[in-house]
Image: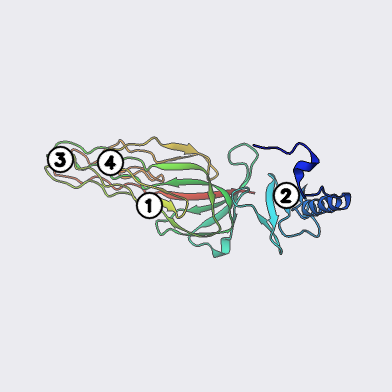
Amino acid sequence: MTRARTLADLGSASLATDAELAGEVSTINSAIAAKPTYAFSASAPSSPSNGDLWMDTSGASPKGKVWNGSEWKSFSGASPATFDEGASTGATFSTLTNPDGDGKNYRLAAFTSTSGGSLMITDAGVAQFLIVAGGGGGRGNWFQYHHGGYGAGGPWFEGELPIEAGSHAITVGSGGAGGPVGNIPKKDGNVGGYSEVAGVLRVCGNNAISQTVSLVSTFAGSSYEYGKGNNATGVSSLTTFGGGGGGATAAAGNTAGYTGAQGVVYVRIEI
């Protein structure tokens, strides 16, 4: 590559004058001044411009917000989502005070009916989810001598995920039906129904022999065991969410297994 070594090498081009350089600096300074400002405070900045950023420190945890020209909106995925409780259906809302012993408080949306419902999110952000599928049905007995096997507990998910603004359909899985009667071995119970927050996560059920590890959690405010398998025979389903159905007895006469317990969907946001 040939490089200019003298002024003659520049040809007819001329160097910028002081006035021209000052103009360029002024343009750069104006561009910097036009960039969005960033504030870190407990109260909203006054006279914001479109695109300005504000870290709201008024709550238990800071929330990132951006000025959209008319209001401060939470960053998508950067802070807790917000519920529109009036526009949601099928949910019971409550406030949880320090449920996990870490000083944090939450607003909880509980979907405890297999009718499901919908959850309306006003501001996108992060939320915590506990989603439990329906428990598997217990195994029926066979040859009129052998008792049925356990019903598997419903699989579960507990954790934090992003959720977008808008309405999210909620599905709560039903328990799987118990295994049928008959003289054929291994009359397994049916798979429990899936539970889902549409657009976020679906948790599918297990059958009678795909056992899962249960979850003990204070997610909904008190300690509770979710997705517990049922190893007993001749008893009805466990009544806990996601509990497995009991196996049939070995009494004379073929007996069907018992139905698994329904699942549940909990969503909570920090407040």
Q: Earlier in the sequence, mark 2 or mark 1?
A: 2
Q: Earlier in the sequence, mark 2 or mark 4?
A: 2
**Residue at point 58%, 54% (across, down):** 124
The local secondary structure at tag 1 comes to: loop
The local secondary structure at tag 3 comes to: loop
Name the residue beneath numbered marker 2: 56
Mark drawn on residue 22: none
Q: CA distance from mark 2 to mark 1?
A: 38 Å
The local secondary structure at tag 4 comes to: loop
**Residue at point 71%, 56% (across, down):** 51
Q: CA distance from mark 4 to mark 1?
A: 15 Å
Q: Nearer the viewer, mark 3 or mark 4?
A: 4
Residue 48 coordinates in the image, percent (x, y)? 77, 58
| Quadrant including the N terminus | top right
Please, which colouring scheme is shown?
rainbow
Q: CA distance from mark 3 to mark 4?
A: 15 Å
Q: Earlier in the sequence, mark 4 or mark 1?
A: 1
Mark drawn on residue 208: 4
Name the residue beneath numbered marker 3: 142
Mark drawn on residue 173: 1
Q: Earlier in the sequence, mark 3 or mark 2?
A: 2
User: Label 4 amino acid?
Assistant: Ala
Instruction: Give 73 or 1, whichever is nearer the viewer.
Output: 1
